[in-house]
Image (cartoon, rainbow, N blue to C red):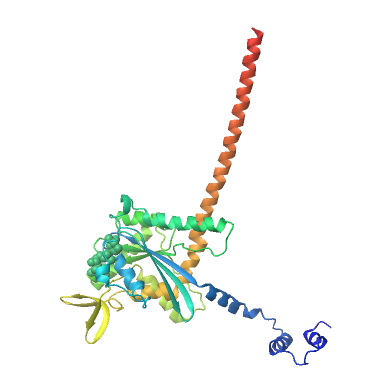
Amino acid sequence: MHTPTAYLQHRGAPMLCPPLIQGQLENRQHGYVGFATLPNQVHRKTVKKGFTFTLIVAGESGLGKSTLINSLFLTDLYKDRKVPNAEERISRTVAIIKHAIGIEEKGIKLRLTIIDTPGFGDAINNTERHVEDYIDQQFEQYFRDESGLNRRNIQDNRVHCCLYFISPFGHGLRPLDVDCMRALHEKVNIIPVLAKADSLTPAEVCRKKMKIREEIKQFGINIYQFPECDSDEDEDFKTQEQILKNSIPFAVIGSNVQVESKGRKFRGRVYPWGVVEVENPAHSDFLLLRNMLVRTHMQDLKDVTREIHYENYRAQCIQNMTRMVVLERKRRWLRKMQEVLERIQEQMQHSQRGGC
Ligand SMILES: Nc1nc2c(ncn2[C@@H]2O[C@H](COP(=O)(O)OP(=O)(O)OP(=O)(O)O)[C@@H](O)[C@H]2O)c(=O)[nH]1
Ligand SMILES: [Mg+2]
């Protein structure tokens, strides 16, 4: 009586089932219930919601942070925007600047937020904690929103990645780099970059990368770890992942100037002895870094932020809150005991006076 066919007959509908139901009936006969469409449902829902990604830069002043983020994202990915001449626009960063860009590709929406920060040595109020504070503030905001009454439409401004700029002129990491990276590594995915790689020869780049990798290990700095490949992953993917791991810290060159040479137009830097191409893999890891951020590891960076860094923050918050509640309870108990004691003392004094 209650099979779909019987139901249609009962309603006086034509004997033929609609194709969808007919298909379902046939699939049922083959043991197919339909939950295999779950990924499609998730896909539709997430596409509708859109994606967000937030990146911050940190490091010494003058290492090319603002130039690189402009080269990486702001000029290229946002083609419709009228960008003033980059050379005119980029000057020393003296405050935290938030660039928010909405981009769409094949119907997929991405809200990209780039946080430019003042370089160390020129920090606001002479503190070097502005990156750390900014990341904490975003966690705090998210924690509050998540614990609030209206948990719908929470804006996720948590920082998913920090490009940490290392000077090409030193002998590896400076003590300030070690301190700063250590202050950040529990809060954000650090991706170290070797700045202004055009000032080094290929052999120097190689040596510096090795030295920096060793020092990162030696000082116990937890930078972003590329996920381990599954054994059934294809060889190309495995090779690509190995290249990425060996490229740390990414040697980058930034420029927002279009150069014309041999009939080609590209972004580069012109020197008396030649031209450096930003997007030439032989000159810098610029493309490798951008592909990693945008194409291959954006979701993993977000997952690690949510599952590890934010969870740490949240656990810490809850622990502090619990500690405060326990402390308050103890304080109240002590106050009560003190009151009882005072009352007993009063009574004793009273009875002593009465006895006299
Ligand atoms: N040689 C070379 N110079 C660069 C590179 N990237 C940027 N510069 C130059 O370095 C100078 C400083 O660049 P910015 O991008 O302002 O550096 P910043 O790290 O943002 O500096 P602050 O805002 O003070 O922290 C500018 O003159 C840039 O043109 C690079 O890859 N190689
Ligand atoms: Mg800057």
Q: Nearer the viewer, residue 35 or 83?
A: 83
Q: Residue 49's spot in the image, x, y percent?
A: 53, 72
Task: Tell me the quarter of the picture where residue 19 sits.
Answer: bottom right
Residue farthest to the top?
356
Q: Residue 300's spot in the image, x, y percent?
A: 48, 69
Above/below status of 341 relative to 40? above
Q: Residue 113's spot in the image, x, y percent?
A: 41, 67
Could you tell me if residue 107 is visible in this image? yes
Whether residue 144 sits left or right of residue 125 in the image: it is: right
Q: Residue 244's spot in the image, x, y percent?
A: 39, 73
Q: Nearer the viewer, residue 148 or 299?
A: 148
Image quarter for ligand 2 equals bottom left
Q: Nearer the viewer, residue 200 or 276?
A: 276
Above/below status of 217 relative to 287? above
Whether residue 178 sits left or right of residue 187 in the image: it is: left
Could you tell me if residue 200 is visible in this image? no
Whether residue 41 sits left or right of residue 190 in the image: it is: right
Quarter containing the N terminus: bottom right
Quarter containing the C terminus: top right
Q: Residue at x 54, y 65 (%)?
A: 153
Task: Tell me the quarter of the picture where residue 2 sits.
Answer: bottom right
Residue farthest to the left?
272
Residue farthest to the right?
1
Task: Tell me the quarter of the picture where residue 261 sits.
Answer: bottom left
Whether residue 204 sits left or right of residue 241 in the image: it is: left
Q: How many marks?
A: 0
Q: Residue at x 39, y 76 (%)?
A: 291
